[in-house]
Amino acid sequence: MSAPGESSQSRRTEVGYPTPAESVARMFYDRVRATPDVEAYRFPRDGGWESVTWAQAEEIVRPLAAGLLALGIGPEDRVAIASSTRVEWLYADLAVTCAGAATTTVYPTTGAEDVAYILSDSGSRIAFAEDDTQVAKLRSQRDQLPDLIRVVTFDGGADGEWVLGLDDLRALGEKYLADHPTAVDDAVDAVRSGDLATLIYTSGTTGRPKGVELPHSCWTYIGAGAASLDILSSDDLQYLWLPLSHSFGKMLEAVQLQIGFPTAVDGRLDRIVENLAVVRPTFMAGPPRIFEKVHSKIVQTVEEEGGVKGTLFRWAFDVGDQVGRARLEGRSPGPAVRVQHALADRLVLSRIRDRLGGRIRFMLSGSAALSEDVAAWFHAAGVLVIEGYGLTETSAGTSIVRLTDPVFGRVGPPINGTEVRLGSDGEIFVRGPSVMRGYHNRPEETAEVLSEDGWFATGDVGEIDPQGRLRITDRKKDLVKTSGGKYIAPQATEVMFKAACPLASQMVVHAEGRNYATALVALDPEALAQWGRAHGLAGLEYPELTRHPAVRAYVQGCLDQVNARLNRWETIKDFRVLERDLSIEAGELTPSMKVKRKVVETTYRPLLDSMYPS
Amino acid sequence: MIAEARLADGTRALVLPLRPSDREAIREGYEHLSAETREHRFLSGVPHLTEVMLDHLVDEVDGIDHVALALVVVGQGGEGMPVAVGHMIRYPDRPGAADVAVTVVDGWQGRGVATALLAELLRQRPEGVSRIMTTVAADNPASLAMLRRLGPATVTRVGSNLEVVVDLPDTEPPPGPGGT
């Protein structure tokens, strides 16, 4: 592919950033040296919270790193981590990096076959597995994984042979350190900025997931770039629940090493609300889904209460919104509004903030577009949610809204040191130290997206406003993104469904900006009539058949087969059978029968909305 | 009517009208296309051509409102190999506008087949058609470039697709690089 030569617009933030460390391992060492006695990680234990300082974290990580060295792990060897977000994930990742090796991340929800694919494609030699469930997946695929010499489990049962416990690895490491006291220091010294640090697998429209190779220089730059933004300091307290298997979570790990704020780690989604009140963080990041969830839960609760409370709530948010908008526009609200706002804040708005612990300075939304309404609602309550933009291929860090220039519906200017420009068709190209080295063992696919002079083609389409802030308007590839930030290839699902359901004429998968996927299904008139005759429904016309419970049950059965083969986030949670097939006359198909997806989605908007109770 | 064409690399080809008897060949040919080529054709996931689709795309070809042509390359030994099919179909509610769809088998993409076939489709286009209105996938730059060569084009992004409107020049369209 070529660089966007006829670019209409480009943007580069011309401010420097601190010199990045040589490696992630070096960042960790530097952090331990700089603030050994400062709190590093906080994590749930026995119903409460425990903390470790940076020096204590190093004492935990060092023998684990040595254990990996003892097992024969060498520079850039891949070590996988299949676990939800918890402090052991961070220890394991730091151990891998201090051994000079590279981490391959695996979602705990990924199916056994895909796990086997990722481990064998990456050439992973050791895998950390959270518990017996993760271990069982690896065990079931052991025949496919000849390179995988050991599994190290956090909580699961060890067998002393192929599967070790974390304590077994530590013991191995301590023994190794007794014989080779400088082994870990030497390994850290040997890591160069261009060495592989992380392999994160991402899926596209077709084919198997691709491993994105991110060298140490990507993460150390992200750390330095974040430091130059001046939005976080060592006084902050982060609440981290995002999947660390995802680049967004990994990015936050690097930023923390650079800036040195403590982080409370708990990946359990159902604990967030409870934990926020106890931890009282100053900063939290998440995909739009989490902000939508908080918003809808509070609004719903108030609506159910109704009465005077409901009225008060609406008034308070109206006042909060006036103040919020004035702030965004750099105005100060009039004296009457200020008085009302003080009351609204005391009665309602401050209580919303209290539910988030009461100390939040701002929150960061990334990995999918955040609805401007939801952002404005939080802002009315006095909580600023800013958006950032990045892909796994750009280490999740390309641009971010600045706290000094808050705005909704934009993802901000590029991070210092990153260049962004638009191709002639609006496609966003990114160049800079955050851009991946390439896709693992896939030179052709790498060449399709990465030009020789370093421009990465994101496949997203956007605009740059006069203030230099990026706005994402669309995606070039036919992938839709849920509000949880997961990609879905609708056409792949449609193919599977049509192959599985002989009644199907068309399926349109819908998921863009929603928290799960649903589908509209149109049935083939002839096939449906035949099916009706065979099932004792001969007298019914097409529209009646489409509404018949037996037809719906049959389609559901086909869909169940398809769902069983999809990743969890891709599954079709609900569907509606249309009362007529898609047609050229209605403009849903072009005369040559190309499906006009947006027309279908617009025509059937109420039907789609009915599958997403608010 | 059988037209002769030449691809950019000099390969000789014939362009001939699609007949109802080609139904099985079209059905079978579709099975061998890659997932991406199929997606670009229907902008939807279509594993197999259904009878309803074949009725429309083969049987309803009338040479008046719906012109459909196949391109057959001629090998060194004179053997023919069908490698592409193209449709130009008038919009029922817009007599002056037609949709186009050109599909080239994967092994022959990027060799000027579509350009040659499109040039012939334009020559044989439904009478009175002066405008092409079609939809192409946004990740299909080859098709967009081909349409842009036909005349002044307006391109609007709608989701992951591009709506393309081309006003055809009054005169006979210029032959593409591989056209006759």
Image (cartoon, rainbow, N blue to C red):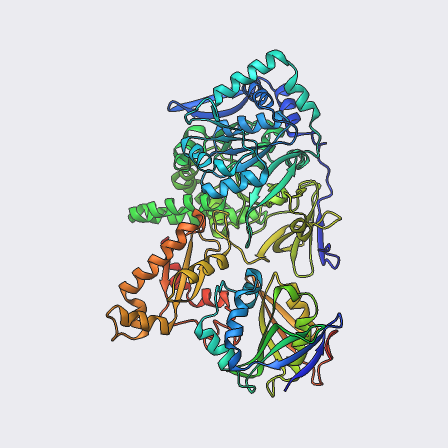
Q: Can residue A589 be seen in this snapshot?
A: yes
The x and y percentages for residue A408 are: 55, 50
What residue lies at 28% left-to-right and 66% top-to-bottom? Answer: A548
The x and y percentages for residue A250 are: 56, 36
- From the viewer's perspective, tell me whether residue B50 is left or right of residue A97: left
Which of A545 and B11 lies nearest the eye of the viewer?
Answer: B11
Which residue lies most toward the front here? Answer: B77
What residue lies at 70% left-to-right and 23% top-to-bottom? Answer: A189
Which of A270 and A199 lies nearest the eye of the viewer?
Answer: A199
Q: Can residue A230 be seen in this snapshot?
A: no
Which residue lies most toward the top here? Answer: A178
- From the viewer's perspective, tell me whether residue A132 is left or right of residue A372: left
- From the viewer's perspective, tell me whether residue A137 is left or right of residue A28: left
- Total tally of numbered discs in the picture: 0
The x and y percentages for residue A79 are: 57, 31
The x and y percentages for residue A278 are: 41, 28
The quadrant in which the N terminus of chain A is found is: bottom right
What residue lies at 44% left-to-right and 75% top-to-bottom? Answer: B52
Which of B173 and B3 lies nearest the eye of the viewer?
Answer: B3
Q: Is residue A174 above or below residue A400?
A: above
Q: Is residue A283 above or below residue B124?
A: above
Q: Is residue B152 above or below residue A309?
A: below
